[in-house]
Image: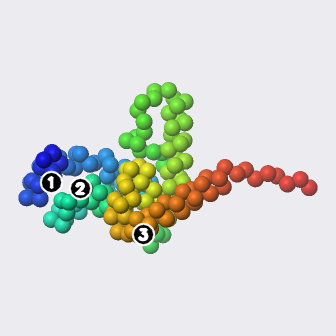
Amino acid sequence: MNEEKVWLEQARQGDKAAFGKLIEAYQTPVFNLAYRMLNNAREAEEAAQEAFIRAWTKLDSYNPEHKFSTWLLSITSNYCIDLIRKRRAILLSIDEPLAPHPALMSEKSKDPEVQVEQNEQQELVQSLLQQLPEDYRQAVILRYWYEMSYEEIAQVMNTTVSAIKSRLFRARRQLAEINLQQQMIPVPQQH
């Protein structure tokens, strides 16, 4: 048995220290998913904490035949979707542009020009993602940032593989259209 399975078994028997090891192992992917969905570092941190609390309290419902990461990311993404819906319901606007969280930044480059370019690229991607409907955004993030299979995404989103393929196709098309529209510069008309 690998370490994760041992920790899971111990955690399912009530061992909080073993669950703490699972938190350490998955804190970055859980935070990154929440950040990509919510576009707010503070909310992402809170969502990650809540996802781990929910995972701990629902650990008895986890099916060991499935990947723990898929189950945990499913809890995270569903919680984030609930937050997004609540935002819309109370008409809370968080439209201020945020810089990417430092945890998402590449530390490989010390060149300021390259860092600026990377920051701009991250901001563009985050901006494009925020314009997608939440189910498209969730599918895109799970596929391209977490490299989940269509089957895993379908499981997380509680739908079919064909629905996931359709959402991803539509999301890619919508992202391309949004990107094209943002790059268009109106040409002044001559009189």
Residue at image coords 55%, 36%? 117
Q: Residues within 10 Å of mark 3 (few under 14, many from 20)?
A: few
Based on the displayed image, in which of its 4 quarters is residue 107 positioned?
A: top left
Given the image, on which type of amino acid does mark 1 rest?
Answer: Leu
Residue at image coords 53%, 35%? 116
According to the image, label 2 marks what residue? Answer: 68
Residue 90 picture location, percent across and down: 44, 71
User: Judging from the image, what secondary structure is the residue with disc 2 in?
Assistant: helix
Based on the displayed image, in which of its 4 quarters is residue 67 positioned?
A: bottom left
User: Mark 3 or 1 closer to N-term?
Assistant: 1
> Is 58 drawn above or below residue 44 in the view shown?
below
User: Mark 3 or 2 closer to N-term?
Assistant: 2
- Residue 38: tell me if it is visible: no
User: Mark 2 or 1 closer to N-term?
Assistant: 1
Residue at image coords 41%, 49%? 145
> Is 6 drawn above or below residue 95 in the view shown?
above
Residue at image coords 15%, 51%? 5
Residue 176 picture location, percent across and down: 60, 54
Residues marked 2 and 1 touching at CB (< 8 Å): yes
According to the image, label 3 marks what residue? Answer: 85
Q: CA distance from mark 2 to mark 1?
A: 8 Å
Given the image, on which type of amino acid does mark 3 rest?
Answer: Arg
According to the image, label 1 marks what residue? Answer: 8
Given the image, on which type of amino acid does mark 2 rest?
Answer: Phe
Q: CA distance from mark 3 to mark 2?
A: 26 Å
